[in-house]
């Protein structure tokens, strides 16, 4: 087993395809398959299984992938340390963000890393909260923001915020401060698709209140939801951060008066990332940016539960 085999194996797991990995690595597919066969023979274990949905790691393959990520990252950081004569954050860090959260956090994070960590390259991956948490637990992402996430093996969970969901609709001619759940249910609704955490909370609230929403359409794309609202098709329910890039006054954004639709926002950190100087530096940058955004009022309708001094508030 050598570093090249580990790098090849990790790329196959990440791309879920030997063909795609061969193209990304710029080597012939038969050669890549032979490297995998040699690695399996060396370890006397089946590492990958091909199926109708691509190439997936076996349970043993998952274990090897987790260790391979740690080894490869440590080698990259060792090279950087030798080059600079000291330990410096360096290498590639993958960060998962839900689409709504990315509107508040993505650009400031990229700017911060580019300015203060020039040897670190951040890759931002957008996806559903559940998928992002799964990817961190499987060591396919280093860090991710996730909603109502649960502690899992190989993953560290840092509670950050409680985020209120808002009723979002076209600008109102007659000013309203709030809407009730029954009023919202009576409107034509455009909602996120399952298993989005917003949709789960909304449907639970409707059931608890004994009302049924008038669902017009559903989509996992926040941009489509807002475009449909802008076109006058109805209302949606989203966190305030989903509107962070929109012009002030373009949408009505009203609290829901009689239902507590709140989700817990947490930072998920993979076990291997906590061993990396670069990942720890990106984690610290993310936490600092989130605290700054909340304190400055740039992330509204949230309550901080993260204590910058190192512990969660009661």
Image (cartoon, rainbow, N blue to C red):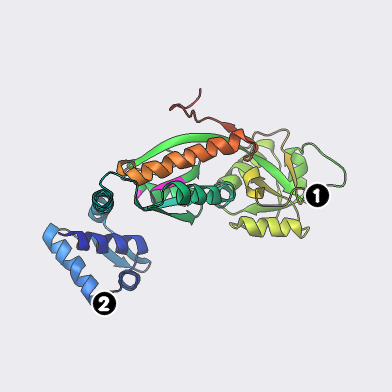
Q: Is residue 41 left or right of residue 222?
A: left
Extreme residue toward the right, this view: 174
Name the chief secondary structure element in magenta.
Answer: loop
Judge whether residue 98 can be spotted in this image. no
Residue position for label 1: 171
Label 2's element?
loop
- Looking at the image, residue 231 lies above or below residue 268: below
Rendered position, 12 above or below 156: below
**Residue 38: mark in rendering:** none
Which residue is nearer to you in this view: 235 or 10? 10
Query: Was residue 278 drawn as part of the magenta stretch in this picture?
Result: no
Q: Which residue is rendered at x = 53% and y = 50% of the image? A: 106
Farthest front residue in view: 85
Residue pictured at 53% horizontal, 39% vertical = 290
Quadrant holding the N terminus:
bottom left
The answer to whether 83 appears left or right of 120 in the picture is left
Whether pointer 2 and pointer 1 mark residues with C-beta atoms closer than 8 Å, the reply is no
Crowding at dot 1, Cα within 10 Å, few <14 / some 14-19 / many 20+, comes out as some
Expressed as whole percent of the image width and height from the top left, the position of residue 193 reads 59, 54
Rounded to the nearest angstrom, the CA distance separating label 2 from label 1 is 57 Å
Q: Secondary structure at mark 1?
A: loop
**Position in image of residue 210 (x %, y %):** 69, 39
Q: How many marks?
A: 2
Which one is nearer the viewer's eye here, 93 or 38?
93
Range covered by the magenta-colored residues = 138-144
- The residue shown at (22%, 71%) is 33
Give the image quarter of residue 11. bottom left
Which numbered marker is on residue 28?
Answer: 2
Among the two numbered marks 2 and 1 on one chain, the one whose residue lies closer to the N terminus: 2
Vertical comparison of 313 with 63: above or below: above
Residue 310: image x %, image y %?
43, 28
Residue displayed at 56% across by 36% down:
292
């Amino acid at each position: 087993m050598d570093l090249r085999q580990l790098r090849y194996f990790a790329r196959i797991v990440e791309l879920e395809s030997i063909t795609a990995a061969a193209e990304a690595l710029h080597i012939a597919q038969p050669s890549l398959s032979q490297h995998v066969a040699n690695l399996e023979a060396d370890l006397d274990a089946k590492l990958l299984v091909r199926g109708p949905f691509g190439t997936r790691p076996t349970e043993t393959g998952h274990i090897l992938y987790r260790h391979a990520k740690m080894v490869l990252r440590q080698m990259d950081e060792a090279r950087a340390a030798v080059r600079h004569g000291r330990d410096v954050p360096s290498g590639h860090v993958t960060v998962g963000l839900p689409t709504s959260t990315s509107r508040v956090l993505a650009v400031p994070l990229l700017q911060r890393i580019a300015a203060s960590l020039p040897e670190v390259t951040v890759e931002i991956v957008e996806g559903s909260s559940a998928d992002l948490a799964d990817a961190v637990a499987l060591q396919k992402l280093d860090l991710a923001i996730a909603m109502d996430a649960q502690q899992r093996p190989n993953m560290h969970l840092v509670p950050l915020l409680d985020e209120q969901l808002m009723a979002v609709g076209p600008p109102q001619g007659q000013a309203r401060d709030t809407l009730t759940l029954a009023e919202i249910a009576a409107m034509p609704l455009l909602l996120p698709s399952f298993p989005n955490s917003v949709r789960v909370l909304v449907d639970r609230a409707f059931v608890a209140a004994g009302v049924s929403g008038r669902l017009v359409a559903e989509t996992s794309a926040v941009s489509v939801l807002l475009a449909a609202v802008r076109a006058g098709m109805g209302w949606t329910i989203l966190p305030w951060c989903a509107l962070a890039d929109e012009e002030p006054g373009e949408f009505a954004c009203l609290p829901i008066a009689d239902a507590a639709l709140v989700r817990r926002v947490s930072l998920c950190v993979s076990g291997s990332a906590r061993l990396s100087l670069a990942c720890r530096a990106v984690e610290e940058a993310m936490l600092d940016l989130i605290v700054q955004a909340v304190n400055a009022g740039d992330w509204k309708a949230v309550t901080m539960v993260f204590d910058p001094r190192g512990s969660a508030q009661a």
